[in-house]
Amino acid sequence: MADGAGGAVMRASFWDRYGNARVSRRRLIGAAGVGGLAAGAVALAGCGRSSADAKPTQRAQQGAANKPDILNPGDTPRRGGTLYSANSAAFGTFDPHTGVQVASAYFPRVYNLLLSQSATKPEFILMDLATAYENPDETTYVFHIRQGVRVAPNDLGVPERDLDGDDVRVTLERLRTDAATNQYSFANKFIASVDVDGDTVTVRTTEPYAWFIPRISSFFGTIPPRELLMGDLSRMSAKTAGGGPFRLVSVTEGDLARFTRNPNYYRRDDEHGGEQLPYVDNLEVRVIFDRATQRTAFRSGQIDLYWAENSREVAEYGDLPVAREPVFNYISITMNAERRPFQDPRVRRAISRAIDRQQYIDIVYGGDAKPNGIVHWPLGSYALPQDELASTYQPYDPADARALIDAVGGIRIKMNFPANTTIQEHGQILPIFVQQMERAGIHVEQQPLEFTNWVSQYHDRDYDSSLALNQIYETPELPLLFHTTSGPFGDGTYIKGLGDAEIDAAVKKANTTIDLDARREAVLAAQKLIYAKDPMFLPLVGPYQNWVYQRRVRNVPVNIGSTAFSLSTWWLDG
């Protein structure tokens, strides 16, 4: 099943990179959310079928169904003002292809994507540098490049010129050839060639790949002017020069970043008389590591939004606007089916039946989460319905668990976990899991490891089971690949699934079906097949994040995931 494995959203060193950066999952979530606030509101978006039957050109369309939901809407936009925000992690490099920390949330603010497909609503596509794309066949994508996407004023020596197809080509070539980039595993495996002809860019893939458009939509695939990718790449670490709605004017690591509007920005707000965007003049982003200090700053009006811990805290803010958005990463139970006792499907089923996901939701997340199936619920129509999960595929059934335990003569398991992680939920989830297992009669031998040792053993499959920190999954690709013979990255690292040829074929079908509707059906079918054979990779729950806004922040786009980061039609009252 190596065919589909190289399309990982990040390289296999994900845990190493985030671990070395000392960014916890909660802090990473917070950083991304703070970036999202400056996103905007009304989009010009097309409902792309993104399929082989989508030979008609995919282009931006208007209409109520093609817009995000709007939080705190306003009637008349107001120009000017500064939006003040805070995050609880370091910025890191602003190199749009290698950065992995807070700066990455601003890549689509200062640069452009070809397009952005919503992870929560895959039918929603925002066209940016490309005005349209088409699929003449399952391995060819033809992008029509927008005229007038002009580089912002900058001090990097890049001319204030229009971006063109050669900028796209140079970016994709870097992603395809530079192993240091976050998109290397995807681009190196799946991009066969990039050709420019006038205002069109033709990308040919090595094989049909269902997730090509979501991968191109990644923040790590933004398109800087090609001059930045020639010579000293380190100059991008703290300076920018792109065609996005804002430009970085200064950054002090660990302290403050300031952005100002790009006067050359191309996009206009057709909902409000064709006004040039963005409306706001400046973004000011301060690093405040302590949550209590952030809360105080928000209560006193020093910052314009705040990530609340849970819905109980949200209630403290009365009728202030709140965006409740899903989180795309989660903690899971990974069982190594190459080792005893997990070779026995009855053992895997007993563990699954002993897991009470509602307990994690109530205790760890204060009610702000939902049970995850193999494909987590934030991925919308790709995920199995909640009622089916509870009744059919992963019911909490301690009586069945105990019967299975008796049938196999008792169950004892060894579980690795990173003992020194800064992820708060990890420390809360572990004792609940152990308690749930012991309650069912399953004994858990805990094996705490220093973080780098945990990563190494997880990578080398040197474990029986693991309570795993997992990366951001914005498509079903990797959650499905965990169950295949070659594992999530196609090279046998981390896990080798169930070694089942039928599952391998079903996952391959899901990951190579280009038609959106057919792909949904294939993803759902693959999950049902895996459940029938008792999965060894069990995501627990997917939390929400709650962003509370000051009333002056108007027209905030919600319910389209990180696609909102590319929008800029929000404004400030006063």
Image (tube, grey):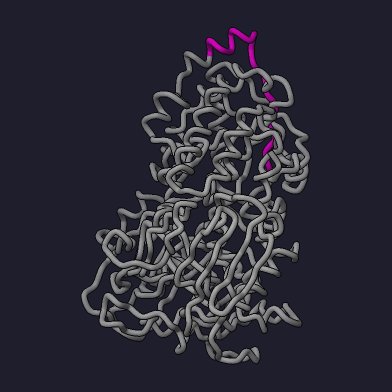
For the point 60% across and 22% down, the residue is 348
Give the mark count: 0
In which quarter of the view is residue 189 placed?
bottom right
Left-right relation of 296 to 330: left
Asked whether 410 falls inside the magenta stretch, the response is yes
Is there any visible trace of residue 63 in the rendered image?
Answer: yes
For the point 46% across and 88% down, the residue is 264
Q: Position of residue 441 (x, y in %)?
A: 57, 16
In the image, residue 59 above or below residue 364: below
Asked whether 321 falls inside the magenta stretch, the response is no
Q: Position of residue 159 (x, y in %)?
A: 60, 92
Q: Please give the range of residues in magenta.
A: 402-418
Q: Position of residue 474 (x, y in %)?
A: 52, 52
In the image, residue 158 above or below residue 392: below
For the point 41% across and 28% down, the residue is 390
**The N terminus appears in which quarter of the rendering?**
top right
Left-right relation of 194 to 198: right
Left-right relation of 560 to 75: right
Q: Position of residue 469 (x, y in %)?
A: 62, 45
**The C terminus appears in which quarter of the rendering?**
bottom left
